[in-house]
Image: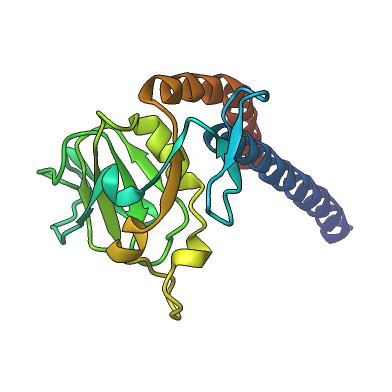
Amino acid sequence: AIADFLDYKLSKIDRLISKETQLIKLLNEQKAGIINHAVTKGLYPNAAMKDSGIEWLGDIPKHWEVRKLKYVAKICNGSDCDKKAEGKYPVYGSGGVFGWNESFLYDKPSVLLGRKGTIDKPILVNEPFWTVDTAFYTKIKTELIDTLFFYYLCCNIPFGFYSSKTALPSMTQTSLYEVKFSIPPVSEQQIIVQHIDKETKKLNKAIATIEKDIVLT
């Protein structure tokens, strides 16, 4: 009887976690849709449009420019270091933080791009950091592009199209440099970033609440 009771309770918990996990997925898809539309079509539905010449991008606002990534950021290699349980600076791989170090590799805001392994999840970093060789870091030309806007653009890269066809997903500097973006003036980029932050704030809060519920379940 006890075993049957536990099976019943655990099955209810499993169903609840499954539903909440699916809800997180849907909220993340909604957030991605907001970001994608804002950084590819802009905020003004009546704006004149033009063909971007990029198949996956389609039409873009007429006054936006198409530029390759290499013109707005420099891609740099990570480097091995002594990882510690404690340290002042986070050490990033393509999947995120996995150690700490006593010194940093770069101390300005940057977008990290996976070189091997997790290649489709760019990471925005605002504090000094170190990256190992599974992740690239970028030196962003902020006179040409807003850091957050660049991050949102990177989140929209069709990584499957640009990645190397190997057993372990990988990206090369050459491929990343050839990625094309549609880019508005910097002042408009900042307005778009503010719009995205406002529209996704509630979604992020809801996702965080659900994730906390799952942990406590």
The foreground one among 207 and 187 is 187
Q: Is residue 99 left or right of residue 118?
A: left
Query: Is residue 98 in view from this perspective?
Result: no
The image quadrant where one finds the N terminus is bottom right
Q: Residue furthest bottom?
A: 167
Look at the picture and state if 99 lies above or below 41: below
Q: In this view, does 217 lie to the left or right of 180?
A: right
Residue drawn at 43 percent across, 61 percent down: 118
Question: Colour mode?
Answer: rainbow
Q: How many marks?
A: 0
Q: In which quarter of the image is residue 162?
A: bottom left
Q: Where is residue 126 in the image (x, y as percent from the top left)?
A: 28, 32
Q: Where is residue 143 in the image (x, y as percent from the top left)?
A: 25, 28
Q: Position of residue 39 (x, y in %)?
A: 52, 35
The image quadrant where one finds the C terminus is top right
Q: Position of residue 171 (x, y in %)?
A: 37, 66
Residue drawn at 60 percent across, 40 percent down: 32
Look at the picture and state if 204 lies above or below 139: above
The foreground one among 66 and 150 is 66
Query: Is residue 32 in view from this perspective?
Result: yes
Q: Is residue 26 left or right of residue 114?
A: right
The foreground one among 172 and 99 is 172
The foreground one among 143 and 118 is 143
Look at the picture and state if 49 lies above or below 8: above
Residue drawn at 28 percent across, 46 percent down: 71
Residue drawn at 67 percent across, 25 percent down: 45
